[in-house]
Amino acid sequence: MKKFLFITLALFFASWLHAQEIIARHSDKGLYVSHTVAAKETFYSLGRLYAIPPKDIAALNNLDMEKGLNIGQIVNIPLTAANFSQDVQKGQPVYYVVGEKEGLYRVSVNNNKVLMANLRKWNGLKADAVSAGQKLIVGFIPSHDGAAVANKTVVPEKKEPLKMPEEKTGVAVNEEKPVEKKAALTEKKAEAPRISNTAVNDGNGGYFKASFDQQVKGQPIKKDDVATAGIFKTASGWQDAKYYALIDGVEPGTIIRITNPNNSKAIYAKVLDKMTGIRQNQGYTIRVSNAAATALNIADTEKFSVRVNY
């Protein structure tokens, strides 16, 4: 059974990789991609997903491996010769978003001095002129069973193949143990109210309100926009009232106030990352965690409007 589950996960990650865009960033420590930690992910599982030693991930992020990772935490994954190729056009493409006043030469320099000839070939360029905001392929992550995706947004979609409780329920259905089946169903029904009613709406806007108040003391609120919003799913926020958001143009780590204009309910969310580079985010200005949407009394609809302040 474990072997079957491993193969299922491997095939799922490989197919999911091809459906996403991986965005490379650069720092004085080299190239990297950003990964938002999901439930049950560890340094070791990320190491397997990105084919990189776990200690290298910890070192790049100045983290202690013994302390583990938190759901919603952003971890930078190094791109090295072990998991990133800039010579052979094979595997999942890694993109770079061209900055202001950057030409093809500067793109090359910022991405391990990848050959400009390769940049022209991979991106179908006939000249060296590029535009700010343009996405260019700068290398490839080999397609293998451990490949993962940076900047993922919808955590449960990644975990859907792991719906083992449903499979177990199907196997356990028999006439010999009706009492056990009834007890299991009763336990499941008892869980849902506990999650949806515990600390989702604490009356104060959530865990990050104090941080927001401190933030505006140093920098008064400058933005007051109505945004088209969607939901991304995460296990965080149901019991600790820690709400999260994805939005462009706001520095990750910033606390923003989000208000439902239909009922004036407000919550405070930490920005995890930007929206750019993910196909599923087209047509949205912001995505909020499902716990945040519940606290705002917003149903799990495809699109809705919120007011954003920061």
Image (cartoon, rainbow, N blue to C red):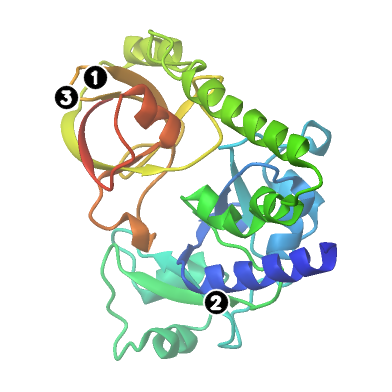
| Residue 98 locus on image (x, y percent) | 35, 64
Residue of label 1: 221
| Residue 286 marker | none
- Identified at 29% across, 58% down, the residue is 100
Residue of label 3: 261
Amino acid at the residue labelled 3: Pro
Amino acid at the residue labelled 1: Ile
| Residue 92 marker | 2
Relative side of 37 to 281, left or right: right
Q: Are marks 3 and 2 in contact (CB under 8 Å)?
A: no
Q: Answer above or below: position of 275 versus 67.
A: below
- Identified at 55% across, 77% down, the residue is 92
Where disc 2 sits, the SS reads: strand
- Identified at 37% across, 10% down, the residue is 213
Q: CA distance from mark 2 to mark 1?
A: 41 Å
- As rendered, which of 240 and 3 lies closer to the eye? 3
Q: Answer above or below: position of 132 versus 267.
A: below
| Residue 257 locus on image (x, y percent) | 31, 22
Q: Nearer the viewer, mark 1 or mark 3?
A: 3
Q: How many marks?
A: 3
Relative side of 306 to 53, left or right: left
Q: Are marks 2 and 1 in contact (CB under 8 Å)?
A: no
Q: Quadrant of the C terminus?
A: top left
Q: Is residue 244 visible?
A: no
Where disc 1 sits, the SS reads: loop
| Residue 130 locus on image (x, y percent) | 29, 74
Q: Answer above or below: position of 104 versus 304.
A: below
Q: Classify residue 185 by image quadrant.
A: top right
Q: CA distance from mark 3 to mark 2?
A: 41 Å
